[in-house]
Every structure is written in C-alpha cells, then in structure tokens.
C-alpha cells in the first residue's frame, strides 16, 4: 500500500493557484453582480413605471381624458424612443394616443409583464405595465428590453473589467509572494546543505524581531548551537574520560599483575587485590556518575520524581555529612524552615547533589572553616538550597567551568576524585528546571541550588 502523495510547493504552484482562485472568484463575482444588478434594475423600473401610472391616472381623473391624450401625444413627438413609451387604447384595444405599436400590448395583459411587439421588420420585447383607467380605457407603460439589456451589459463590462484588474493584481501579488517565500526558504535550505557537507559553523542570517522565517532561522541556529555544544561536550568528556581513567586502569592492571605473580608474598598479594578492587570501585563510580548526569540532563529521571519535604531531606543529608565535616575540622550550621517545604523532586539525585556540595566544602574549604546549609522559603516559584563556606573559594573566572564534567582546578589532575561532583549538581538543577549558581561568599564559596517548584504529576 503506497502512502498518500504530499503536496509539494513548486515555484509555479502558488501563482497558478492564485490565478485559478482569482478566475473562479471573477466568475462567481460576475454572476453575483448580474443577479443583484438585474434585481435592482427590476425594482427601480417597476417603481418608476408605477409612479408614472399613478401620475397619468391622476391626470386623467382630475383634468379629463383629453388632457391625458394631449400629454401622451406630446411625449411621443418630443421624446420618441427615449425612456418609457406610452399608449392609450379603448376597451376594445383601439389606439387613442401614444405609440400605436403598443396598442396590441394592452389587450390581454394586465399588470407588469414582458410581451412581444411586432414592428416593421423586427420583433421587439417590451416590459409592459397595463392598467385600466376609471373611465375604462387601457393605459400602457412600456420599456424596451433592449435598452435594459444594454444597460445590464454595460454594468457587467465595467464590473468584469474591475474584477479582472483585481484578479491580475492578486496573481501578481501571488507571484511576488511566491518568489519571496521560495527565496527565504532556499536560503535556509542552502544553510542546511552547508551544514550537511561539514560546515558546522554555518548559520541562517536573521533580524529582530523579524518574520516567521527569521523565527525559523533563529530556532535552527539555536538548535545548531546546542548540537555544537553537545558535540564539544562529548569530545571533552571523551578526552577527559580517557585521561582520568588511564591512571586508575593502569594501576588496576599493575595490581592484578602483582597479585597474579606466584613469587609475590601472600600479604603483598592481598594488598594488590585490595588496590585493584579500590581502582575498580573508582572506575565504576565514575561511570555511574556519568550515567546519572546523562539521565538527569536528558529528562529520563523525571519518572523518579515525587512529592518530598525538601527541608527535611536537606536536614537528613546534613546529619549524614556532619561527621565528615567534623573530621575535617569544620563547623556545620543548618538553617531550614520549621515547616515542610514541599516540592516534586528526584529525592535520590537531590540527596546526592546536596551531599556533593557538602563533600566539596569538607574537601576544599580547609580546617577551621565554617560551613552552612540553608533552605530558603519558596520565592518566585523556586526553592533555593544554599551551601556556603569560608574557605578559599573559587576564582571568578573559573566558576563557569567547574560544573562541567571532569573539570578540576588542579592543573596536574592529581587530586582525588573524578571531577564530576558539581556536574551532578548542575544536572540535578537542570532536571528540576533550575540552575546552579556559584557566588563569592566573602570569603569562601556560596553554592546556590535553585529548584523550580514543579506541579504534582497527574495520574492517568
């Protein structure tokens, strides 16, 4: 079974469609003008004929039949074929005044009708109104249908010419619009082609505020920038992972080689096995952290989110890390609201993020440093978890890069750890539609984990 064919926009399609629509509109408009015009002409003619009948009837009633005969004869001599034609006959149809050719029209016709009148060499169609005077005579008021037809054709010609001009204007506008649309679309297509051939820095030219194509180009540029960032991040992660895992795997291989040497004493063999296990645990922890970051950044961890007391969760993590900070010779202060701060969060990832911030403080703030963990009440739709210390802090120029994967401020990269702690915190913030902010605590570092208060999930 073949799929239905999708309409494709060709360069000639829009003008042809516009012309077809315009011509169809022209035909319908002409029919409408003809029908409406004919109706208006009928109404006006009927009204004029009735007014003439009433006037002539009143003239015959007030001044007598002779005055009416004189008036009709004078009209016949002066006006001739112009406008309405008049005839007066007796009850038997014999002409008394006016146009003698209309005498037969008053015999059998009463009211407003169309009749045929024989004239020398031709047959003329008349629109005739016949009325009987109080004295018994027939008054005939007629208009030549040819005059009405000529007037009708004149209206149709003028209307058709005006509508034709409008149709041509619509077609020209359609052609111009088609050229403009295709030109803009071809520009975007050409940029996409450059990207497909390997020029990943190509971008669509846009202006602000712009039109729909500028918005489309802006979205495409944003997508390309994001792809470039992801590819750069992927290269960075790959390079960093290769660098950071080389030494642990080398040490793991060396420890296993010593453990497998039959000449190594038993005690040294067990030490080598323990070292190999430690290196393996370190490698597994690094890969596990990378998976957590990837799931959080991709949104796959949203299925694990649930309504949680954020202040209570933070207090639990503080209790867990309090001994670690005490061993580092530091003082921990916990400031959380007395009432529950509820929000839909990923509790496991949030515990890990808060724990990483406290662990970094214990690791880098130094002895005698003061560390505080606080949960601020919801404001502007966000809950802010703040971990601050009075240690050496992070230089301002480095605060934007430390949340990236495998980033360590130690150039030699000899300090323990994988460099993924703050990357996990940043991924947690992204999962919760928030952000990680690193500020100067004067002295020390102030890390703010801002989480958007997400609405409760709806069960299906």
Image (cartoon, rainbow, N blue to C red):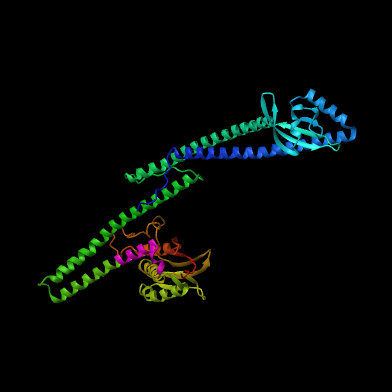
Name the image quarter holding residue 195: top left
Please state the horizontal and vertical placement of residue 70, each as a whole percent of the image: 85, 27
Looking at this view, name the residue that lies furthest to the left: 263
- Residue 265 visible at all: yes
Viewer-proximal residue, 459 or 112?
112
Magenta stretch, overall SS:
helix
Residue 285 in picture, x, y percent from top left: 30, 68
User: Could you tell me if residue 416 is visible in this image?
Assistant: no
Percent across and percent down for residue 322 are: 39, 75
Total labels: the figure holds 0
- For this orientation, the residue located farthest to the front is 92
Q: In the picture provided, is 151 more to the left or to the right than 287?
A: right
Magenta segment, which residues?
287-303
Residue at screen point 75% across, 39% down: 111
Residue at the location (51% across, 73% down)? 337
Whether the magenta-drawn stretch holds residue 293 is answered as: yes
The vertical placement of 437 against 13, above or below, is below
Q: Quadrant of residue 258?
A: bottom left
Q: Is residue 386 above or below residue 214?
A: below
């Amino acid at each position: 079974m073949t799929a239905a064919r999708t309409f494709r926009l060709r360069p000639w399609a829009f003008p042809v469609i516009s012309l077809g629509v315009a011509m169809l509109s022209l035909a319908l408009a002409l029919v409408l003008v003809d029908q409406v015009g004919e109706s208006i002409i009928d109404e006006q003619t009927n009204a004029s004929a009735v007014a003439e009948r009433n006037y002539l009837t009143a003239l015959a009633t007030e001044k007598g039949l002779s005055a009416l005969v004189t008036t009709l004869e004078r009209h016949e001599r002066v006006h001739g074929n112009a406008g309405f034609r008049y005839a007066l006959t007796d009850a038997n149809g014999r002409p008394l005044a006016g146009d003698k050719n209309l005498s037969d029209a008053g015999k059998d016709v009463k009211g407003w009708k169309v009749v045929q009148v024989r004239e020398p060499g031709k047959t003329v169609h008349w629109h005739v109104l016949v009325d009987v005077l109080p004295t018994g005579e027939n008054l005939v008021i007629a208009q030549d249908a040819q005059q009405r037809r000529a007037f009708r054709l004149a209206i149709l010609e003028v209307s058709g010419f005006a509508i034709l001009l409008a149709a041509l204007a619509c077609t020209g506008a359609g052609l111009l619009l088609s050229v403009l649309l295709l030109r803009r679309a071809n520009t975007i297509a050409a940029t996409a082609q450059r990207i497909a051939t390997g020029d990943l820095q190509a971008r669509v030219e846009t202006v602000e505020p712009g039109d729909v194509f500028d918005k489309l180009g802006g979205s495409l540029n944003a997508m390309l920038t994001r792809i470039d960032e992801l590819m750069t991040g992927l290269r960075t992660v790959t390079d960093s992972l290769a660098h950071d895992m080389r030494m642990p795997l080398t040490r793991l291989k060396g420890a296993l080689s010593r453990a497998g040497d039959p000449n190594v004493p038993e005690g040294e063999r067990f030490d080598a096995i323990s070292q190999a296990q430690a290196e393996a645990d370190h490698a597994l922890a690094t890969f596990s952290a990378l998976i957590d970051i990837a799931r959080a950044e991709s949104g796959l961890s949203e299925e694990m989110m649930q309504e949680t007391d954020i202040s209570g969760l933070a207090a639990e993590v503080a209790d867990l890390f309090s001994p670690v900070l005490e061993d580092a010779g530091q003082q921990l202060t916990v400031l959380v609201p007395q009432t529950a701060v509820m929000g839909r969060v990923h509790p496991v990832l949030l515990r890990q993020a808060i724990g990483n911030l406290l662990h970094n403080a214990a690791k880098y703030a130094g002895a005698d440093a003061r560390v505080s963990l606080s949960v601020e009440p919801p404001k502007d739709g966000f809950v802010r978890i703040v971990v601050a210390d009075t240690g050496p802090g992070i230089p301002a120029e480095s605060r934007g890069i430390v949340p990236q994967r495998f980033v360590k401020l130690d150039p030699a990269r000899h300090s323990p750890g994988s460099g993924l702690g703050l990357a996990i915190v940043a991924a947690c913030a992204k999962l919760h539609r928030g952000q990680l902010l690193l500020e100067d605590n004067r002295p020390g570092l102030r890390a703010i984990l801002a989480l958007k208060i997400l609405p409760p999930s709806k069960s299906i």
